[in-house]
Amino acid sequence: MFVSKPEDIDPESHVVALYYVESNLDLTEAGVRIAEEQSIGTWTEVSTLTKGAQRLAAKVFKSVEQSPGSGLVWVAYPLELFDLESGVPNVLSVVAGNLFGLSSLRNVRLLDVEFPKDFVREFPGPKFGVEGVREIVGTLRDRRPHIGTIVKPKVGLNPKETAEVAYEAAVGGVDLVKDDETLTNQSFCPIKERLPAVMEALDRVREETGRTVLYALNITARPDRLLETADWAVENGANMLMVDVFTAGFSAIRMLAEDPSIRVPIHVHRTMHAAITRNPKHGIDMMVIAKLVRLVGGDQLHTGTAAGKMESDVERLKEINDFLRSDWHGLKTVFPVASGGIHPALVPENVRVLGRDIVIQAGGGIHGHPMGTRAGAKAMRQAVEAVMAGVPLEEYAKTHPELRAALEKWAKQT
C-alpha cells in the first residue's frame, strides 16, 4: 500500500518530499514508516481503515542507499491530504510532523519538497520581490548588491539613539536599516516612539542625498497584535516590516502578505533556525524553509553567508539563493540576505559566490569601524563599488580612507 513505482506518481497531483534517512531497517522499509506515520497508517492494524482512506496513502517511490543503513528516500503525498486553506501549518504537519521521533529511524532530515503548480498558485508569494525592492531603493539599473545594517547594540538604545544610529548608517550609504531579532516593543524602545524617530531620520537622509533607505521595523508578536501593529506602522510611514518567522510562524507572514493595506515589503528573519536546520543528518533543510517563506510572501530572507561568522554549506546556500531568485510558477522572487559577521573585507567573496542580487548586511562590521558608524557604512559602500568596478579592495582603499581603515582592522579576519 505504501510503495509505488515512479511512473505511477503524477507530480501534479502529489507533493513529493525528499528525506535523508538513517535506520537499521531496509531503506525502503524505513521510508514506508514515514509514509505510514504521515498519512493513513498507525502502529497496528485498525478496523476503521476504509477504501476511501486507503487512496490517500503516502507512497515511497524511490530510495538510494548512500552507505549501509542510510540514504535518500522520496515519498509522494496525494494532494488531497493537504488543507490548502490552512496552508503551511498543515503542510509541515504532513511532510515533517511526527516522523522525527520515530524509534525505527536513528536520524531523518527533510531535504526538499516539490509542490505542484496549482498548489503553489494557492499562495500569495511576495508582493515586491527583488525587482520591487530594487525599484523602491533605485537600483534597477546598476544592479549592485544592496547594503544593510542592523542597529547595534541589538537592544538597549532608546528611540532617539536608535534614530541617530539609523541616520549615520543611512547617510553613510546603506540601503536598509533593520531592527535585530530581539527588539520588538520593549519599554526602553517602544515601537510607537521608535518608528517615527527613525523615519524622520531617514526622511532627512532622502532630503540630503536623494536616496530612499528602507527601515525594517520588527513587529513580531502574537497574531492579533502583529496585524494591529502592522496596520499602524504602515499608516505612520513604515516602508518595510520585519517578522521572525520561526517564532511568529509562517502564517503571520501570509497574513501580512494577503492584507491589501500592507503595501510595504516584508523582511523575514530566521532567528532560531539552526535548532532545526544545522544538524546535517536530522531536522529540516534551509531549502524547505526558503520555499515556505516564498509561498507565504516574504520579500527578503536571511539565508546565510559565503564568508562570515555563521556556519554555512556554501554550495547548498547557492542552490537556495538561486531558487529564491528564479521563476517558480509565477510567484515573485525573494531577495536573499547575507548576514552574520560580515565586514568590508568579506564583500568580494560574498558577491563572487552569491551574486549581485543579494543584500549584504553588516552590524558590527559597520558600527565597529574605528571612525564610527557613518565611516563604517561608507566603507561597506566603497567595498561594493570596488567589486562592481572590478578593482581589488586594497587598490580602491588607497583613495578611500574609510575602506582603508576597515581593511586595516578586519582584513586578517577574512
Image (cartoon, rainbow, N blue to C red):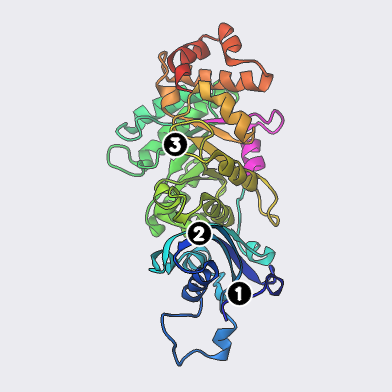
| Residue 33 lies in the magenta-colored region | no
According to the picture, the residue beneath numbered tag 1 turns out to be 78
Q: Which amino acid does the dot numbered 1 rest on?
A: Pro
Determine if residue 210 is in view: yes
- Residue 400 against residue 174 in the figure, above or below: above
Label 2 or label 1, whichever lies nearer to me, is 2
According to the picture, the residue beneath numbered tag 3 turns out to be 310
State if disc 1 and disc 3 touch (CB < 8 Å).
no
Q: Which amino acid does the dot numbered 3 rest on?
A: Met
Q: Earlier in the sequence, mark 3 or mark 1?
A: 1
Snapshot quadrant of residue 413: top left
Give coordinates of residue 189: x percent, y percent.
Answer: 32, 37
Which quadrant of the rendered structure holds the N terminus? bottom right
Q: Earlier in the sequence, mark 2 or mark 1?
A: 2
Snapshot quadrant of residue 156: top left
Provide the secondary structure element on which disc 3 rests.
Answer: loop
State if disc 1 and disc 2 touch (CB < 8 Å).
no
Q: Which residues are magenta?
A: 129-148
According to the picture, the residue beneath numbered tag 2 turns out to be 68
